[in-house]
Amino acid sequence: MKYIVTTPWWLRMMFPKNLTWEIPSDEKILYLTFDDGPHPEATPFVLDELKKYNAKATFFCIGKNVAEQPDIYKRILSEGHRTGNHTHNHLNAFKTKDELWLNNVKEAAKWIDSDLIRPPYGKIKAFPAKVLQQSNPPFRIIMWTLISADFDRSKTPEQCFQYVKKNAKKGSIIVFHDSEKAFPNMKYALTETLKYFASEGYGFEAIS
């Protein structure tokens, strides 16, 4: 499994233009994001932990999961968090024809009312990106500053937390996953992230 925990400038240059990788801030603000939910166990855990710190986050949801867990999706919104489109079936844009991928985004949009989108696996081609950015209303494509690697079963929960602790800074967009696969690592890494950065005077906001 190949991935990079942080996204250096040279990597960002390889992607389409006008993607959001971080949100520059002079204040101690972090942007926690969660991919692949809603999940019947992981997502309620996340919401409970966020509530302890009055933290807001952004959930990039899979359309079919929203269809299966509508009450959890409603809870995300009712507790003041934001949601974003993560396609209907978690399609890899590099392995899917552009028209099919864009139609999958549209299918997810029937369940997810948001102008935010994160492409699964962080993979998106120039043409679909342009279509999304020029749609009415336009989508804002949200990438990330760093990932916790909670989905990687070869990593320990402590390693996942340390990735966040060592690399997060003001305005960082951080990726966790509210999924079955990531849950064992995520539940520790998220708890420790909230505890540590709150003690350092950070706040946690949803992407506006």
Image: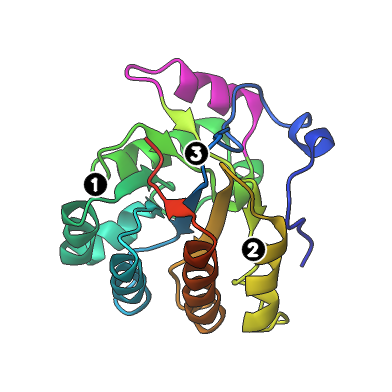
Figure quadrant of residue 170? top right
Circle 1: element type: loop
- Quarter that holds the N terminus: bottom right
Q: Which disc is residue 111 wearing?
A: 1
Residue drawn where x is 33% and y is 47% of the image = 83
Residue drawn where x is 49% and y is 54% of the image = 202
Question: How far apart in space, not on screen, are marks 3 and 1 (Cα)?
Answer: 16 Å
Q: Is residue 15 left or right of residue 80?
A: right
Look at discs 3 and 1 and give the one toward the viewer. 1
At label 2, the amino acid type is: Val
Q: Is residue 127 magenta?
A: yes
User: How crowded is the residue under tag 1: few (<14 C-alpha within 10 Å), some, or many (20+)?
Assistant: some
Residue drawn where x is 59% and y is 42% of the image = 93
Look at discs 2 and 3 and give the one toward the viewer. 2
Q: In this picture, which residue range is highlighted in magenta?
A: 124-138
Q: Are marks 3 and 1 in contact (CB under 8 Å)?
A: no
Whether 143 is drawn above or below 61: the answer is above
Can residue 196 be seen here? yes
Q: Is residue 8 magenta?
A: no
Q: Which residue is mark 2?
A: 164
**Among numbered discs 2 and 1, the one appearing first in the sequence:** 1
